[in-house]
Amino acid sequence: MSKFKYDLAVIGLGYVGLPLAIEAANSKLKVVGYDINESLVTNLNNSTSHVEDISNNQVSNSLEKDLIFTSDSEILGESEYIVISVPTPLTDYQPDLSFVEAATKSIAENLQKGHVVILESTTYPGTTLEIVKPILEKSSKLTAGEDFLLGYSPERIDPGNEKWTFKNTPKIVSGINKKSLEKISKFYKLIIDEVVEVSGTREAEMVKLIENTYRQVNIAMVNELAILSNMLDIDIWEVVEAAKTKPFGFQSFRPGPGVGGHCIPIDPKYLSFKTRQIGQPVRFVELAQEINNSMPNYVVARISELMNKKEILLKNSKILILGVAYKKDIGDTRESPALDIIESLLEKSVDISYYDPHVDELTVNKRSIAREENLENLSNFDLILIHTPHSKFQEINFDSVTSLIFDSTGSFTISNANRL
């Protein structure tokens, strides 16, 4: 029988930590959700979810089971397994592990023999051994792999994906030694359908980076081909649709206004940071980042070109952006290309409005962007930019719109639209 009161404590209740806490509670584990944000904890205890993929009812149902939310770090000492799922942003284009370090210090202050600590936050290879392990050992005077166990397991959350959920997406697990791996693997098998073991924490940390770097590189390739196809008067969308009929040796990626979210724009930069430490830049990956980062400016250039052809001045023109989230049917605007596009258009004195059924408010450079409420007035704008292909937009009769339309998504059949 375990000496601990709780089976699991999850540090960080964002889009990664909250689903883990709820799924673990659904698997009949005693779970603590810990976060330093007291208002967030209060809302969760009142069954109010801030994560789109988690409903208020799911939170309420979990609270009726063995799940509690708290901002008291002492409770970490009462939980056998402790998972770190805090943000790892970029600050001044450098990996910022301050949240990971703070969470690790909180664990160290409460660490006991028998604890199992697992890092899930996205980071560069070596973080578990070089950052987390020393902090835990120094403060607690305990030995990792013996007195307490330690490992890394990358998150694979895809917001808005109804097919691949937290439970049925295979889970990569690792440990700093065999004992850690066995214990961590056994734990995740309690709540996730398939667990995949790898030999070490560096390998597991690299898995997350290679998954999203793969997407970054292939999106960059098709984005560059989209630019070239436009210059050659070739329909890149027809090309992509035809190419993906090949049943082997090809995976389809679609061009767009750039890449968004926390994963694709950010994770490859962690890889670049680590490889530059050893004096070997990943040139291919960094070129892909450069191409994708340039796409918002390309979109603005295409808009300006289209308006010039119609003898419409870009300055003081009225432009409506349909969709500002970084992906379809969610409200997450983190790293969204729409933000860069809006910023560029504002600098050119464009009157910008947006409509997104999933985003109620939008601020760019401390400036509030007007939200259009009436989609019957689309013809009142000089140009409509389709940025995010939300399902809701399928209801719009674009063919009746007299304004210029620029579809950067290639997701709509519009007779009078210009496409990326």
Image (cartoon, rainbow, N blue to C red):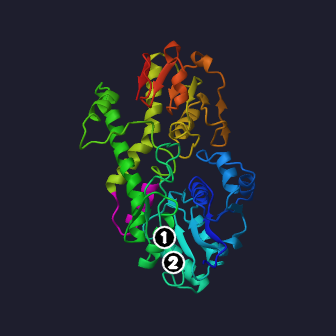
Quadrant of the image containing the C terminus:
top left
The x, y position of residue 13, in whole percent, is 63, 57
Q: Point out the frontmost of discs 2 and 1.
A: 1
Q: Mark 2: few, some, or many residues within 10 Å (few <14, many ≥20)?
A: many
Which residue is farthest bottom? 141
The x, y position of residue 225, in whole percent, is 31, 36
Q: Which residue is mark 1?
A: 184
User: Residue at left 55%, top 19%?
Assistant: 382
User: Residue at left 57%, top 25%?
Assistant: 319
User: Residue at left 62%, top 79%?
Assistant: 111
Q: Principal SS element in the magenta part?
A: helix
Q: Quadrant of residue 276?
A: bottom left
Residues in magenta?
267-282
Q: Is residue 239 left or right of residue 418?
A: left
Label 1 element class: helix
Quadrant of the image containing the N terminus:
bottom right
In the image, residue 410 above or below residue 415: below
**Tag 2 near tag 1, CB within 8 Å:** yes
Q: Which residue is mark 2?
A: 149
The x, y position of residue 30, in whole percent, is 64, 65
Q: Is residue 86 left or right of residue 225?
A: right
Q: Which mark is residue 98?
A: none
Residue 274 magenta? yes
Q: CA distance from mark 2 to mark 1?
A: 8 Å
The x, y position of residue 52, in whole percent, is 60, 44
In the image, residue 215 above or below residue 34: above
| Sequence-wise first label, 2 or 1 | 2
